[in-house]
Amino acid sequence: MKHRDYLPEFVYGGMDGIVTTFAVVAGAAGAGMDSSVVIILGFANLFADGFSMSVGSYLANLSELHNYERYKRLEYHEVNHNPAEGQEEIRQIFIQKGLKGEALEAVVEAITSDKDVWVDTMMKDELNLTPGVRSPLSKAVATFISFNIVGLVPMVVYLVDFMSKLHCDLFLLSGLLTGLAFVGVGLLKSYIGEQPLWRGVLETFGLGAGAATLAYFAGNMLEKMFS
């Protein structure tokens, strides 16, 4: 399995991880909390939300796999018990592709001579269903790892400050690092979706900035209300 096969999970998990973690950091910064509190809240968010997201990914992909297998069983049942109807469905599929006459009948005969090929053709061309090349568990693990690795970026500055005091604006520096991470995730998103690079970067950056702004002002307001 190629590593690039997991790029969608990396983008999906990484983008959610960095957005939610930076929102936690922004909320803590808005409330004036120190580095230790930011680290505690950040790691709690990473592990809890990362696990929740990976479980959701696993269940969704497992359901998709079960759905594929259910339809495949139905197609085998049709092939075995009503072959004439199944042959006509294959014929209609290739008529829509532009075949006709002897060429059409030759293709229908060739495909329906092998039940596995027959069913696979029906699954793909009639139902628009294809088997997944990756297991639900591997997708979930990839999502969890990317969520935690990329989501750690906003907290790096606070971890360094906790071990050795930094004399700078921690939230500003964290924001700069997070912005660079957003750019990287946005570029990958554009690459996977085959869209303009600027669009992927703008989408991820806008999403993160919006979440962080809301969290920062919410934290600031709550700190003033309860202080």
Image (cartoon, grey):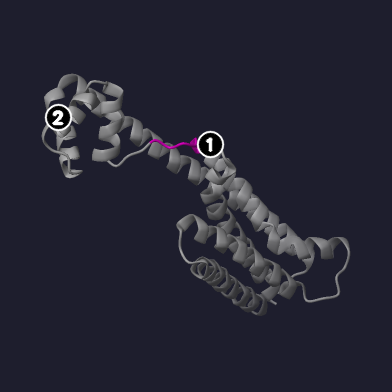
Chain-order first, disc 1 or disc 2: 2
Secondary structure category for the residue under label 1:
helix
Name which residue lies at 29% across and 35% down.
Answer: 123
Residue range of the region highlighted in magenta in the rendering:
131-136
Q: Which residue is mark 2?
A: 105
Q: In the drawing, does residue 136 fall left or right of residue 184?
A: left
Element at label 2: helix
Q: Tell me the amino acid under the disc marked 2.
A: Glu
Camera-nearest label, 1 or 2: 2
Question: Magenta includes 95?
Answer: no
Image coordinates for residue 132, horizontal then vertical, percent: 43, 37
Q: Which residue shows up at 79% across the image and 60% down it?
A: 159
| Mark 1–mark 2 distance (CA, rounded to whole Å) | 42 Å
Secondary structure predominantly adopted by residues drawn in magenta: loop
In the image, 1 versus 178, the foreground residue is 1
Nearer to me, 145 or 188 = 188
Give the residue pinned by disc 1. 137
- Classify mark 1: residues with Cα within 10 Å, few (<14), some (14-19) or many (20+): some
Given the image, on which type of amino acid does mark 1 rest?
Leu
